[in-house]
Amino acid sequence: MSGPSASLGGLGINGSPSLPGEATWDTSLPPEKQLVQYKTSSGEVKTISKAELQEQLETSEKLMASVTETWEQKLEKTKEVQKEREKALESLGITIEKNLLGVHTPKKVRLDQFVSSAG
């Protein structure tokens, strides 16, 4: 199995001093081939590739960022999305204002799309 070699105080990656128990990696192997084993809180030993571990970490970081986002930031993003949707509907000839729906001729209509090319 490819994976970290436990180092007990020698040199780590790039010749830097390593800490006891610190893992070093064979940099010639792609992350998909580097395997990590860890023990869960329930005591189960799991094996996962370094690439999968990186992906899980990135997903967790995104989730934490969204959880720690303030209510005001979320409200601002919601307002921006609402404005974009209103612009898209307006270009189709639909307006929504204070829960009233209005339908009108779209401002930008290509007339050639209605003309038949048969002839």
Image (spheres, rainbow, N blue to C red):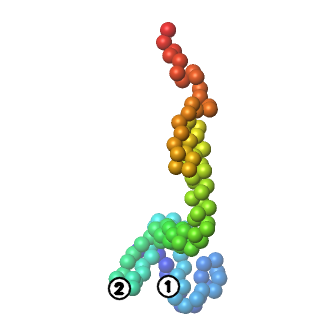
Tell whether 97 sits left or right of 33: right
Horizontal and vertical percent for residue 55? 49, 67
Tell which of 14 and 94 is nearer to you.
94
Residue at the disc numbered 1:
6
> Callout 2: helix, strand or loop?
loop
> Callout 1: helix, strand or loop?
strand
The reply to whether residue 29 is in sight is no
Q: Residues within 10 Å of mark 2 (few under 14, many from 20)?
A: few
The reply to whether residue 74 is in sight is yes
Residue at the disc numbered 2:
42
How many marks the image carries: the answer is 2
Q: Residues within 10 Å of mark 1 (few under 14, many from 20)?
A: some
Amino acid type indicated by mark 1: Ala
Q: Is residue 107 above or below residue 50?
A: above
Estimate the spatial distance between the alpha carbons at disc 1 and disc 2, rounded to whole Å.
Answer: 23 Å
**Residue in the image at 36% along x and 81% along y:** 45
Residue 71 is drawn in which quadrant?
bottom right
Q: For the N terminus, which image quadrant?
A: bottom left
Residue 39 is drawn in which quadrant?
bottom left
Residue extending farthest top: 119
